[in-house]
Image (cartoon, coloured by chain):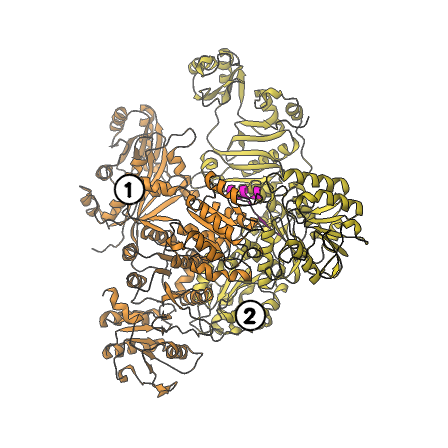
Chain colours: A orange, B yellow
Amino acid sequence: MAGPNDLKPFFYPASVAVIGASQDEIKPSGIVLKNLLNSFSGRIYPVNPHYSSLHGIKCFPSIKSVPDSVDLSVLITPPDAVPALLREHAEKGVRHIIIATSGFGETVGGEGLEQEIREIAASSGIRIIGPNCLGVFHPSSGLDTFFLPVDRVPRPSAGNISVISQSGSVLGTTMILLEQEGIGIAKAVSYGNRVDVSETDLLEYLSTDEETAVIGLCIESIEDGRRFISTAQRCNKPVVAFKLGQEPAGRLASRSHTGSMSGKYEIFQAAFRRSGIFETTTIEEFLDLLKALSIQRRGHRDLGRSRQKRQKQKERKKILILTNAGGIGVMTADLCSKAGLAVPEIPSEPLKKLKAALPSYYSLSNPIDLTGNSKDAEFGLVLKTCLDYFDAAILIPFMTVPGMTPQLGDVIISSIGKLNKLRIPIVSLCPFSKDGKMLEDTFGKCCIPLFPTPSRLVKTLAHLLRTTDVEPITEKLRGFPGVSSLIRDRDTEDTNMFSLEDKKRLLDAMNLSYPESVRCKTITEAVSAARRIGFPVAMKIVSPDIIHKTNVGGVRLGVRSFKEIQQIFRKLINTTTYEYDEKARILGVDIEKMVQPGVELIIGGKRDPRFGPLILFGLGGIFTEVIRDTAIEIAPVTHSVARRMMESIKGYQILNGIRNMAGVDLDAIEEAIVTVSEFISAFPEIEEMEFNPVIAYPKGIIVVDVRILYVVNSEQ
Amino acid sequence: MAGPNDLKPFFYPASVAVIGASQDEIKPSGIVLKNLLNSFSGRIYPVNPHYSSLHGIKCFPSIKSVPDSVDLSVLITPPDAVPALLREHAEKGVRHIIIATSGFGETVGGEGLEQEIREIAASSGIRIIGPNCLGVFHPSSGLDTFFLPVDRVPRPSAGNISVISQSGSVLGTTMILLEQEGIGIAKAVSYGNRVDVSETDLLEYLSTDEETAVIGLCIESIEDGRRFISTAQRCNKPVVAFKLGQEPAGRLASRSHTGSMSGKYEIFQAAFRRSGIFETTTIEEFLDLLKALSIQRRGHRDLGRSRQKRQKQKERKKILILTNAGGIGVMTADLCSKAGLAVPEIPSEPLKKLKAALPSYYSLSNPIDLTGNSKDAEFGLVLKTCLDYFDAAILIPFMTVPGMTPQLGDVIISSIGKLNKLRIPIVSLCPFSKDGKMLEDTFGKCCIPLFPTPSRLVKTLAHLLRTTDVEPITEKLRGFPGVSSLIRDRDTEDTNMFSLEDKKRLLDAMNLSYPESVRCKTITEAVSAARRIGFPVAMKIVSPDIIHKTNVGGVRLGVRSFKEIQQIFRKLINTTTYEYDEKARILGVDIEKMVQPGVELIIGGKRDPRFGPLILFGLGGIFTEVIRDTAIEIAPVTHSVARRMMESIKGYQILNGIRNMAGVDLDAIEEAIVTVSEFISAFPEIEEMEFNPVIAYPKGIIVVDVRILYVVNSEQ
């Protein structure tokens, strides 16, 4: 794959051909030509064998008949015509093509055609955006290939936000909403079925694009998860993602929509988190955050922060709410609390100053309510006096109050200066009245973004105050001596079974503890093993043919005497005990030290087709099954990501100690998570592995059971 | 308190006096007079000793000097003047007064003044709305006491929604937002500090008000919880509530805002649920739902439904999503899934019809995507063909598509008829483009509400599809023979302690089981008790001076031999065992049958100052402490409410049986919840009671421990 500069002609072509152009202004082919003629200053070549001229300019019968070089072609023809057209373009030497046409992988029977154009692209070196897409809108060059009429979808002006969207209708909606709010666009791309140019290619290109300050990604799937993450990690501009197809119903819909299969949403969340990408879940949240970031560059990405620094970050952020509308202040404070933000009282020093300066009937507890008697200057005064004591401020100016004027923004600038110079974000509710609209200009001047409702405001502010750990995914893995052969030379017919010795070898290599146990073939061996280990012991049947040992009575816990050992041994090795074929191979009985009660954990690894190895952690037993209280991250993880996983589950309180239960060995768990994450990363043969249960104690952890599933039909 | 008709003059006065009137149009007193002169057709009497006329009409020096009768007075004077003015009004015979003035209970030092006017109201029979409020806006009579200038807060037209709000700024905002959307108001009241007329009085009045079809309540507190619930239960109009001051920060703010103390939010939720009131948590959700209900009367309230019917209701509602904008359809399907709504495939019969009628490249899996080639008539066709198979439909018409026109609404009416005749709700996304605005008229005609974003649409639809159990709060409680004396004749110095006999009497009266146990004073008694009960047993010290028995080693579990009994008995009765005063009274040792492991539950009762007795239920142990997985309802509850409590907790899966754990005796738990709820209702002496743990088994439940806290300083 070529470098990101290879995409430049999609945005800065000197000449554009429209293949299938027409003059019919309600057909896509007519709309695109019309829009280009209106906005694009480069050369335009309509191509359509049925016309000799369109809108008074020459129309060519084919791309080959265009006399000059063509930097970019937009194909808007029936789908069946596309492969031949691509070949013609290759011969002509056109290397950048937007295929707007639909009827490919997103429709029943269109997959073959899609595969054909994918192959042509790969062999000819042509770069393709689409098919089934709107293509590119780039206001500063006037390039506009969206087949949406300008009178129905007004275009935003030039700005610093770039948006990439798989879906055309979402991008169209985004254009309408941004235009309504007067927010500008740097570059907008709808890439549809993605036979060639992908979200990651575009992200890489925009990372170094000078016009772009903020990047919005509206995606349904990601082609190459690892490349996406490392590209996003390298991008030092804020990136906001909105993933469509989050839930089963949506996933299904997504499949038929752009022919792309969406993955499990939690994995995307892990990828976004790891990449330092803001995750949003509604279109308003997506656009609000893009807007705020285009004005105030906030949101921190930290590389490998210290534990102290992370601890500091976990403290709830302190918000000052300043209003002259008590009830709206209360509802905003409610929303802050729900979002994990604090609305603490005004500290005594600034409070004293405010009391001296303001009428006694103003309410000076946070939210500060300046009441219906408030004036512009009082908003300025409170901000100037209090801002140093908070992490952010929310303004709720109710402009129906006679003393408030559209000069409020200027007053704020003169009290505290322009906001982009400040260390903390300030956001404002867009005053609901018509008068409030007048504020837009002056608030724009001092870089205070306006939001239409308290809930949208608080959601965005919470994003601006969030700090993410962007921990690189290391390629350096520890060695697991002696295990390689165990994994690689496994008996492929028996992939899920470990011999006791193999299990011990595995756990020793991972430096994980396990209960002492002895595999016994006779009662005598069992008795002497129990004597050595000490009662109580557990007894477990060993048979490759009995998988769910517990369910069929193949496991006995709390065996306390030699007599019991003898009775149970006889019972366990008798195949008629189980509802199994009498030919079940019985290899023996494991005599195992009973583990002491502790906190049950699960540590697991999993390989995702898009994102590669993943690491899972959670509390075991009913916590995992009923509460689904688990954390998932891209593997391998560093110690600090492992610690974050532990802290992120609800059951963390239990790990940390609760009531008269002591806390468990957090360092040992952290180490185990890191180890398992490196282990699954080291062995691509593994599809899934589960350490379950792992029992955690105040000192140390013990792995009671291990299960590994290998990749079926792995490349050999 | 007089009947609701007593409030009529607040809305339909023949004459209104404005006390403290002025001509200054930026002062509240000037704004109110101006607004009344512009809109009110009855007699208007400005009162102010400083003027002889205002706006060309006579101004009176005092209310007494007004020659005619006055139905309603609006007081906008300094707060200190209010008590004297009220007395003058009482003498004049004015019985309805709105006190707009602030500076009462909501400010430091204003509580005394507020108490004074409360007493004047009570003794004179004057009805008061306020103080610290906007008063009344009633478009059909032209009455408008809001001191908000009309050019800054445009007033909505007359309609069928009535809104009651404690907060003036929230009501002002509501007016602006409704007016912007062209939605009408029947009556709007801001009642501020509520010295007299309360939310419940207003709710009662509006319940029978002919102009009102839907009621919105924006409240910070509720004065009389029980009366509120029964009033709401009797109201057969949909009621939508938005409670401000939900979280600690907001609660604090609320206190300083209108001087009212908010309660725990979960109790309000229980009250709303019990009343059949829709609960909303943001201003947009509140207004969206009011709007939808004013057009489509939906949302069911069922009285005492059968278990089968409830079962049926719990099935996920099936939503048809019909769009020509694939990506927006996917994001809407995502939101439906998150809201617990299903987006199932189109059944084969209608699917066959659609396939025959529509182009093959339309995507006919739900969400149905009619693509950029869609036409109005196809929306009508799909609705007509599929509607019978679904519980609701969502329309997402992307009007940027050339084939779509503003006639879409008419086309829909002609295919399926007017929506208010249909059995199911249909809602639509307001098309984002300017063209989409054109749809408002025709969609209005067919009663399809429009929403600006998918998330607001789905939230409202989920409300419309919800069915609540409005179970009346019965006054008939079972008898608890023999317990009354136990509670009432308790040793008040020792309120938290039960003797073993009392505990047994209590649980017997409630028909609840407990582990067999014997209180023993000697080792001989203990040994013979253990012989009768059978090993293992638990041994528990009995002492009024040792409260937390477990923590100090006063409880021994799993005692398995006579020898152990003897040793432990000696240890337990020796006060030096505990770090206690050696004078601790030791009454004996309880020998108790060890309970078998089962599922730990908590059943509790609690008395709230506003809402009276409450019943709580949850899974015990870490579930209660870590996950806060509890249900709370207003007591007493019926069996069906008790069942709903069980079903509402996350741990219900555990009760119902999970993996290889059997389910527990749901009927026994249900019965116990009902019993405890009736018990706390029967004894107002009880502040809190806790049955914890209760152990549930596949058959039966056992109460292991009971704790009762009595009301301190209860009226004697």
Q: Locate residue A14, reporting x and y percent.
A: 29, 76
Q: Nearer the viewer, residue A699 or B474?
A: A699
Placement of the N terminus of chain A among the 4 image quadrants: bottom left
Q: Locate residue A429, reporting x and y percent.
A: 49, 55
Q: In 3D space, how far apart are the residues under numbered discs 2 and 1 (Cα atoms)?
A: 56 Å
Q: Locate residue A349, reporting x and y percent.
A: 46, 39
Q: Is residue A79 above or below residue B391?
A: below
Q: Is residue A78 above or below residue B320?
A: below
Tell me which corner region of the image, top left, top right, bottom left or bottom right, holds residue B406: bottom right
Q: Chain of mark 2?
A: B
Placement of the C terminus of chain A among the 4 image quadrants: bottom left
Residue B390 seen from this side: no
Q: Which mark is residue A639?
A: 1
Q: Nearer the viewer, residue B147 or A556?
A: B147
Q: Is residue B374 left or right of residue B714?
A: left
**Secondary structure of the residue carrying numbered label 2:** helix
Q: Mark 2–mark 1 contact, CB under 8 Å?
A: no
Q: Nearer the viewer, residue A686 or A220?
A: A220
Q: Which residues are magenta?
A: B236-256
The amino acid marked with disc number 2 is: Leu
**Secondary structure of the residue carrying numbered label 1:** helix
The amino acid marked with disc number 1 is: His
Q: Nearer the viewer, residue A125 or B95?
A: B95
Q: Which mark is residue B439?
A: 2
Tell me which corner region of the image, top left, top right, bottom left or bottom right, holds residue A162: bottom left
Q: Locate residue B222, reporting x and y percent.
A: 63, 43
Q: Is residue A485 left or right of residue A708?
A: left
